[in-house]
Structures are given as structure tokens and as C-alpha cells.
Image (spheres, helix red, strand yellow):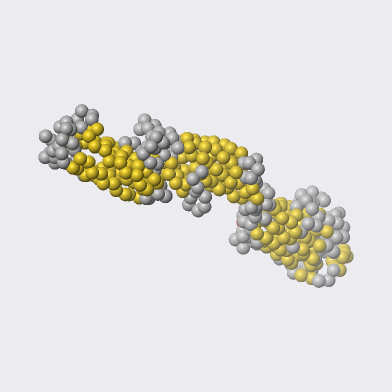
Amino acid sequence: MRITKKITLSVTLVAIVLLPILFVSTNFMSLGSVSTTATMTGDISAVESGTTSTSNWSVGPVPAAVGSSVSVDIRIDGTTPKTIWGWAVNGLNWTASVLQLTKVKQGNFLTDSGDSTLFVGTNPSLWNNVIGSITGGLSCGDSVSATPQTEDTSGVLATLTFKVVSYGVASINLSDAVLLSSSADEGLGGSAGTEVTANNATITANQPPASLIEAFTGRGGAGANPNSGVYGPQDLVQMYALVTYDQASVANQEVSFLVQNPNGTVVDVRVAETNSTGYAYSDYRLPWPDTTTPQVEFGQWSITATTDLSDIAINSTVNFTYNYAVSVANINGITLPTSVVRGSTIYINVTIQNIANQPSWSTVSVTVYDSVDTPIGNYLTSNSVVAGASGVRAPIIIPSWAFIGNATVYVDVLTNTPSADGVPYCPERVAHLQIMP
């Protein structure tokens, strides 16, 4: 409703026959006035709903501001009783990047004689949440009388409800606020309303302090796109999570650890509580690969640690490779011609694959058994297996006393040096060759 401004605070009205009030678009329109003389005063302000003067307030960070609702009262104070027939705030704007209008409700001012008032601004078709405004602003007038009806000196004109859509500072700006002494102030040929002070409001949607959870294992994996290396069957995966809030560690916080295989199947769930330094710990023993248990297979596995801080779920994921860290990729050079005879030397080439991120010291053993399961030759070497593929060339002399027929080659890769504490990195690889007379 657009009002023509008049600065004079003393308004004289001339009595005429009251005609029906017409409402067109967002304007109240009538052809008449009543005889009265009054001085209208008042301040119209945007304040925190439920308060009388709080014009600057905050929401968040706890609970999180985004997604919450805030209510703003447009209220009037310091008026003269029985002199006000209507009011208008022709300019009403807000910061649309932070707030989105969801509801407009008429207040208790001008409802002394019941709810028979004309109120403009509740229709969502008038709201523009792109630029943050109500087309035509807000306005209200008594719909059954041309004379002043209010008995109140202050009250709520309207309550606006907003949804917080982002963090930042939002302004609720009011402009062109006027009071009407009668229906004639808004009628054709009627006198102008009286401009009054309009006070704005500011709402700050505070961003929560940085909440962080970082998952890693006993072999590392913290940071961006983390990978904590290689774990083999029966290895114990030590799962950790560090929980911080605004760069300070959080104690006694429940953390869930979710273990998933390469197919995304959940194979384990554990829950642990952070200690006094913000660390939560649990572990998971990797099983042996089993073709009858599809969820246990080699590949990239993941651990996701999740917790809830200030009603916000945060999580972190660390990956690891489930496989043999060092294994025999292939055995070459052992498919020999049938003319190979006893007393000759054969060379068995073995490719060792190291998928770990660092060199691993290992012992490679190549042993040949003849057809009656008698060991007839062995080659043993200990060296550091670098990341990637490396080769071992094993010379084996076939003794003259070896039994002819199908011989078997066994290749093993052990940890450490060839001693009692050397354990296998991976399963034994087997190949066959023929020994001829």
C-alpha cells in the first residue's frame, strides 16, 4: 500500500457521509472522512520477536543457525490512543542471501474491535525472496470504521518468520512508515498519512566453530585423500579418530568406526569414546580371504569415523589396501624343454611384487623337489624388496641322482632374514617341470 507522505503532525478531518471502503491491489481506498482533530506520533521498529527493543541479535552457533527459523516483530511504540485508524510500512526489505521469508502474521495492534481489519502482506505471492522484499510493503486499516479505533499506545503490527539459509549478517530494513488518522487518509482526494520514524534490525547468523574429525590408522593416513598403506590377512587394523571443536580437543565424545570392503559392504561397526586428548580408538582384525565369504576380498577398504558435534554430524574416511604386502607375482623360465637332463643348470626367474609404500626386507626361497618329493636344489637370497616389481634369478643345478619325472618348484617370500622368526608374506607359489634321463 503506497502512502503519500505528509510531514505535518496535526491533521484536521472534515466530516462527510461514510461510503463503503474499497480495497484495490495493495491500497485501501474510500471516498470519505470524519470530523476529528488529532496529533499522531509513534516509532515503528523491527525487533526480535517477543521483545520490545532488541534490534540487534544473533542466532547460532549452537545449535547451528542454518536451517533454523527466526521471528521478527514489526512493532509500534509511543502512539497517542484513539487517534490511529491504520498504518503502513511501504518499504520492507531483508538480506535474501541469509534470510528467506516463510510467514507473515498480523499482530495485535488495531484489533481492539475484533479481527475485522484489512491487512496486506500475508499473501506469499507478494513476497520476493530473490531480492528480499514484500511488494507493496505491509499495511493495515480498520475495515468497519472510518474513525480511529485503537486503544493501545504500543503493540505488534506484524510478525515475520524467516528461515536462515546461510551464515552472515542480515538487515531488516523499514522505510516510508506512516500512520493514518482515518480511512480518508488513504482515499481518493483524502489527506496524506503522517510519516513516522522507522527503525531497522540486524540479525547475525553465526557460523559454528570449526568442528573436525580426522580418521587414521596405526600406519598413518591422515590428511587429504588419505591412504594408510597395506594390511594383510590376520593383520590388526588399529583405528583412530581425533575430534576437535574450534581447534580444541573434545573428550568423552562417542565416535563410530564403520569398516567397508571394496564393494561398499559394511563388514564391521565399532563405537569408542574419545579420551582426554580427543582421541578415540578401536581395532579390527582382518580375516583370511575366503571364497565362501564374498565380503572378505582383496582391494581397497575404508574406515569412516563419525561423530556429532552441536547437532551436526561430521565424519572422516581413511582408506587402506587389503592384500599381501609382498607377493610372488609370477614365476618365469621354469617351463623347460623335455630334453633337460640331470646334471644341467636351470634358471628360475621370480617376480616379487611389493605394493607397500616403502621397501620391505625379505627372504626369497626357491626349492625344487623331484618326483619322489626329495629336495634336489635350493636357492636363498635376502634383500630389500623395493616398492613395485623386482626380480630374482635363481640358478638350480639338477643333480645326477634326481629321479626323473615331474618335479615341483616352490617359491616362498618370508620376512626378515632366514631364521626362526621369518614368517611368510604371502602364500607359497608352486610350478612344475620335467626331469629327463
Residue 128 % position (x, y): 62, 60
For residue 120, side relative to residue 114 (left or right): left
Looking at the image, which is closer to me, 165 or 110?
165
Residue 259 % position (x, y): 48, 39
Tell me the quadrant of the picture where the N terminus can be found.
bottom right
Whether 197 is drawn above or below 48: the answer is below
Residue reaching furthest bottom? Answer: 7
The residue at 27%/44% (across/down) is 350
Looking at the image, which is closer to me, 11 or 124?
124
Tell me the quadrant of the picture where the C terminus can be found.
top left
Q: Is residue 101 visible?
A: no
Residue reaching furthest top? Answer: 372
Whether 116 is drawn above or below 78: the answer is above
Dividing the picture into quarters, in which one does residue 100 lie?
bottom right
Dividing the picture into quarters, in which one does residue 422 lie?
top left
Q: Is residue 5 visible?
A: yes
Q: How many numbered callouts?
A: 0
Looking at the image, which is closer to me, 399 or 101?
399
For residue 306, side relative to residue 262 (left or right): right
The residue at 62%/63% (across/down) is 131
The residue at 49%/45% (across/down) is 219
Dividing the picture into quarters, in which one does residue 396 lie?
top left
The residue at 40%/46% (across/down) is 360
Residue 266 % position (x, y): 47, 37
Residue 400 % position (x, y): 15, 35
